Amino acid sequence: MAVRAVRGAVQLERDESGHMDEQVKQLLTAIMERNRLTADDLISIWFTATPDLHSDFPAAAARGLGIVGMADVPLLCAQELDIDGALPRVVRVLAHMESDLPKAEVAHVYLGAAAALRKDIAQ
């Protein structure tokens, strides 16, 4: 079993806690489903949010997914760099996992307008 990393992002329509919760849950669910992951496969998850997001911690959504074992996965939130012209209201994810998938088969997930961030790897 190898250690792999999977990326993902979602752009929020607005900075509201409930909306962030919904969108981050959708992103994490898609990452887990597309890569056939369980909480036991996850080593850690890093979240970043653009500086215009203040309503909640993205990691709080992960804790609220109701997935058995998710409480044992280390989660960390950080602020994304404030770059002129960057896509606003974006939550990014970098999840480290144990997987038999070859690197080329890891399914990175960019939802909605966030797909523009990494057209080369978004699936």
Image: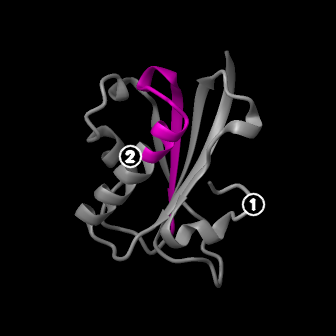
Label 2 vs label 1, nearer the camera: 1
Q: Is residue 39 magenta?
A: yes
The region drawn magenta spans 30-50
Q: Is residue 58 left or right of residue 10?
A: left
- Secondary structure of the residue carrying numbered label 2: helix
Question: Going by the image, does 8 lie left or right of 84?
Answer: left
Amino acid, disc 2: Ala
Quarter of the picture containing the N terminus is top right
How many C-alpha atoms fall within 10 Å of the one at disc 2: few (<14), some, or many (≥20)? Answer: many
Q: Of the residues shown, which amino acid type is indicated by label 1?
A: Asp
Q: In this view, does 22 lie above or below 65?
A: below
Q: Residue 29 carries which label?
A: none
Q: Does the magenta stretch include residue 83?
A: no
> Going by the picture, which residue comes out furthest to the top?
1
Quarter of the rendering containing residue 123: bottom right
- 21 up-or-down from 28: above or below: below
Residue that numbered label 1 is attached to: 120
Q: Which residue is drawn at 30% across and 66% down?
A: 55
Q: Residue 98 appears in which quarter of the rendering?
A: top right
Sequence-wise, the earlier of marks 2 and 1 is 2
**In this rendering, is residue 115 above or below 72?**
below
Q: Distance between the residues labelled 2 and 1?
A: 26 Å
